[in-house]
Amino acid sequence: MPLTPPPHLGRRAFLGASALLLAGAARARPAPDNTALSIKGRGAVGDGRSHPLSERFRSLRDAQRVYPHATALDQESDWAALQGAILELSRSGFGGAVTVPPGRYRLNAGLALPNLDHGDDSFNEVEIRGAGMRSTVLSWTDDLGPDRFALRAGSRDGGPDRDGYQRTRIADLTLLGPRPGNRPGDAPPGMGGVAVTSRFVLDRVGIYGFRAGVDVWRDHSSLLSCQIAKNHVGLHWSKGTRSFGDHLLLDVDLAGNTLASIAVDPENGIDHSSFISCHFGFSPYGILAGDGNGGRAPTRSFLSNNKLIDCAFEACGNGWILGPEAEMHGNSLIGCSGSLLPRYRLAGRPVTGLIVVRRLERNLFLGGTASFGDGTPGIETAAVVAEDAVGNRFEDGERLVRMAQDGGVPALSVARTCRANRFQAVEVSGEFLRVGEGGVAGGELVQRDYDRVRRAGPDKPVLGVAMAGGPAGSVVPVATAGQVPVAKTAAAIRMGAVLRPAAGQAQRVDAANGTPASVGIATTDAAEGDATVTVDLRLTAR
């Protein structure tokens, strides 16, 4: 359709104005967002064999005319082509994507993504895209050594830009390190896999055979549908780095590493991060806090204010979450479950419990935690072990609170402060409380003894019913509401009877009159000689 000038504007003026507008639009038009460089057109081979630069160039100077970043003729052509494409796009003014076609590319040096800075326009965002995790493989057959990485952000070198950030995406490829392992105790390589900073996105990336598959620094990185296995540890919040949290892991398989799915150095910590449908385990530990900080307590909380949703701690050998010197507070574990499997156990290391920390505070265990105690052979102390446990909620704790009843270990073992740790089971709710002098037996009525409980005495307010027995100093679940079996006298009890503490045996119940306030109502008949009766608790004093 031809351009027609408005009635009030002459044709010449109209055409001149149109030309100016079109020219301005051309100048303002952004660069295309599909800028891409394929490394196959820049000298990469990708046949899985070694092709050093010396195959193509007589001297290093000749090689540097094509690859200015090269420093030796024994460097692989695949590495030189890939690093060169990264540098070319980062300096292009628009950034873009380096594409890596199907193939097995051999590399013998680390790849570096240029650092970005909020006030520096010299470098631009660069992505690396493969053709699929099985199709595009970047392979390091030689170990580059400690503190070296297969792929890192430029700021991970330290120096004046060490606080810089990165905004990049790595997708649809595999990084294969020098020493894949799958048995607990296998010796790890020295080099790491991917060293991230801020706002990294790893999307459908496989990482195998490194000391740490991903080394985490700073904040807001995302791992999506990745598999990080056969490393020493899957993810490492490492010493000397800083993580401000807010990471996202969605559908990430971290199972099958030789020490732990995740390891956290005492100087570091995981906070305000989300783990959704992730798979931990098939290794000695799910999440492991490093010990030893020069004799000092850890600098930061081990785990704080994180969300773990529908995650599995499956087939762990020595424990799900372990940090005997560390703090775990404010976390929500929703729909999470797991098991222990001796096959993945490190010899000589105890299986103290499923979760072992120094301080457990204000954590929520909701849904799925009914699997506490399922398939967990060999626990030595308790399902959850802490020096201090305060304000935790076990909202789906059926199996957890019944572990000791079934002949297993106690639910909790707390060395010092044990306060306000509530549970909700199928038919009963209550609190985990420390036992006072004399111990208690399962089914006995108990009274409060300051911050502990003891067998109920005559004319004393009944707090609840011990659901499991234990000696003085142990921690037992005490039911305060719902239906629970309660120890009774020998006399028969009819369903619907109002039950009170028995005269002379205040820790038991009977239907006699003239005793203190009622405990509850019998929900079943209990014949003469029966040891217990199920009671719908109606405690008038707590």
Image (cartoon, rainbow, N blue to C red):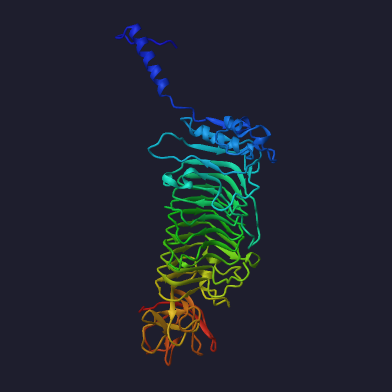
Residue toward you, 240 or 246: 240
Tell me if 114 is positioned left or right of 191 in this view: left
Q: Residue 252, position in %: x, y?
A: 56, 51
Number of marks: 0
Residue toward you, 523 or 214: 214
* The C terminus sits in image quarter: bottom left
Instruction: Kindly tell me whether residue 99 is visible in this rendering.
Output: yes
Task: Judge whether 82 appears above or below 317 on screen.
Answer: above
Q: Residue 86, position in %: x, y?
A: 54, 36
Tell me if 270 is positioned left or right of 227 in this view: left
Task: Judge whether 280 appears above or below 504 on screen.
Answer: above
Q: Residue 70, position in %: x, y?
A: 57, 37
- Res. 514 image quadrant: bottom left
Task: Judge whether 98 appears above or below 10 on screen.
Answer: below
Task: Judge whether 360 appears above or below 102 on screen.
Answer: below
For the point 52% across and 76% down, which residue is it?
410
User: Which residue, as the protein is rendered here, is positioned at the far left?
Assistant: 8
Residue toward you, 224 or 458: 224
Q: Residue 187, position in %: x, y?
A: 63, 59
Instruction: Kindly tell me whether residue 510 is visible in this rendering.
Output: no
* The N terminus sits in image quarter: top left
- Res. 106 image quadrant: top right
